[in-house]
Amino acid sequence: MAGDPTHSSPGSLDDVSMMPAVDPYLRRGTAAYRQIKEQLLDGRWTAGDRLSVEMFKSALGVSKQPIMEALRRLSADGLVEIVPQVGCRVASYGPQDVGDFFTLFGAFEGAITAVAAERRTAADLLALDEVHARIGDLCSAQDTGARAHAYRVFNREFHGVIHRMARSDMVEEMSLRMWDLSDFLINTAGIPQPLSSALDDRHADHEQIRVALASGDAAGARAAMERHIVGTLAVIQSEADTEAVRAAGS
């Protein structure tokens, strides 16, 4: 009743105090999940590598339970594989699975970009220009390791701006999961500094996408994005071939 001092309004401190406490193991599990996931996406291990719970306990300073919680979540994401009575390892996908993924991913991202071309604002385009310029500056960097890592970060920012242009939280969330798997497949392929040598070409792809978005060309934006994503397969294969030749000659 209005004016009743015993009645708390929605969102008051009384409401917060009545909420159930968060399990500290859940918080630790979430922190462990995020840390291990970032290392997986950054290529800390290659496909098929064994992952030790004891190693994570020591590195992250937590008990077994949060680590197991994190690994179960990563397994649901398709990034690790938990084998009963054996242990855990980095997930491994065959060439057909990888090819199918990038084909479907390309179509999905192309559709999002077409929508973005119709909904983008001047502020959106300015934000995209800023990230695009940072990637352009990165093209002249000499350290291949730094180029590869920074490109992964900036590339996610570039595509993130496009996702926000589409103005669909649900679609953006779906896309983020696919981007995680894309980074994972690229960086666990056993190729040192993946995409570093292809950075100029990837940047040129981004320019085509940026121009189509700026002009409101939905069909052009869709086609440019789909070519860009599906083209990742050729880049991975080219760099794998180069690495194989280098390894054979060493």
Image (tube, rainbow, N blue to C red):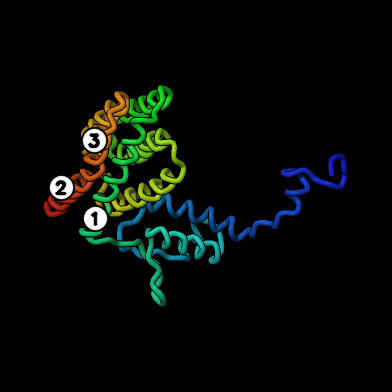
Tell me the number on the disc at residue 224. 3
Would you name the residue on which mark 1 appears? 100
Calculate the distance from the C-alpha at mark 3 to the C-alpha at mark 1. Answer: 19 Å
Q: Is residue 99 above or below residue 220?
A: below
The residue positioned 27% from the left and 28% from the top of the image is 217
Q: Residue at x 37, y 34 (%)?
A: 162
In the rendered view, would you say 162 is above or below 31? above
Q: Quadrant of residue 207?
A: top left
Q: In the structure shown, which secondary structural element does the residue marked by tag 1 occupy?
A: helix
Amino acid marked by disc 1: Asp
Nearer the observer: mark 3 or 2; the answer is: 3
Residue 242 is tagged as 2
Task: Tell me residue 168's x, y (percent).
Answer: 44, 40
- Spot occupied by residue 208 in the image (x, y as percentages of width and height): 24, 29
For residue 161, above or below residue 191: above
**Amino acid of disc 2:** Thr
| Residue drawn where x is 36% and y is 33% of the image | 116
Q: Quadrant of residue 222?
A: top left
Amino acid at the residue labelled 3: Ala
Q: Left of 227 or right of it: where is 165?
A: right
> To which quarter of the image does residue 92 belong?
bottom left
Spot the residue most to the bottom. 85
Q: Could you tell me which residue is drawn at 46 percent across and 62 percent down?
A: 71
Q: Residues within 10 Å of mark 3 (few under 14, many from 20)?
A: many
Which mark is first along the chain, 1 or 2? 1
The reply, left or right, for residue 203 in relation to residue 53 is left
Q: Is residue 108 visible?
A: yes
